[in-house]
Image (cartoon, rainbow, N blue to C red):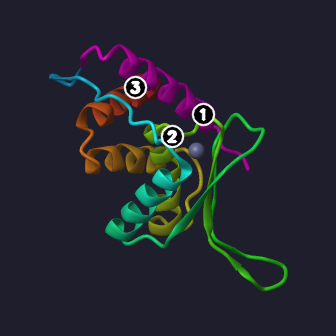
Amino acid sequence: MDDPDRSTVYLCEDRVAAMIATGAPVRAGGKVLRPEPDHKFASLAEARVFCTLICAELGLPPVSVRHRAGETQSHYSPATVTSHGRERPAEIALASWGNSKLVVVHELAHHHTWTKADGYIGHGRVFREAFVGLLRHLGLPGQAHALQHTFEVFEQ
Ligand SMILES: [Zn+2]
């Protein structure tokens, strides 16, 4: 699928990860916020519980979470009906380094826009707003601020 915003979002996310690593304050729009440390899930089970709780809280259908062997990027697949007529639930496949909460929230933002924004699957404005909104919802205003600011820099 044509998704020109994908590489920009990945670049912005890398920058935010670097900001989180330094813990330095981010100045933007008259506000100065320090991005909170990134939580690293200790296990796949912990990431699953997190996703289950967030989906229940936001009224999203459940999403299954698995490891994605041999890949460097995590991936979201919406629920689908297989050629055998069986329903396969939405799935988040985490790359080997995907134990970062920021990465899991990125994939949950896809689940959110797919469910709430008529099957939206790209990385455009709808996705970016959902991603930032989820971070705010999770009590991570510093990370949300850093990500929003980074997106705005790239949109100029
Ligand atoms: Zn994505």
With respect to residue 33, does 62 lie above or below? below
- Residue toward you, 51 or 5: 51
Q: Nearer the viewer, mark 1 or mark 2?
A: 1
* Circle 1 residue: 97
| Tag 2 residue | 103
On the image, the x and y values in percent for residue 45 come to 51, 55
Residue 24: give x, y in percent of width and height: 28, 14
Q: CA distance from mark 3 to mark 2?
A: 16 Å
Which amino acid is tagged 1?
Trp
Instruction: Name the secondary structure under disc 1.
Output: loop
* Residue 67 horizontal/vertical position (percent): 66, 49
Q: Residue furthest left?
A: 30
At 63% from the left edge and 70% from the top edge, which residue is drawn?
A: 79
Start and end of the magenta stretch? 1-26
Residue type (three-letter) at the residue carrying disc 2: Val
The single residue placed furthest to the bottom in the displayed view is 85
Q: Earlier in the sequence, mark 1 or mark 2?
A: 1
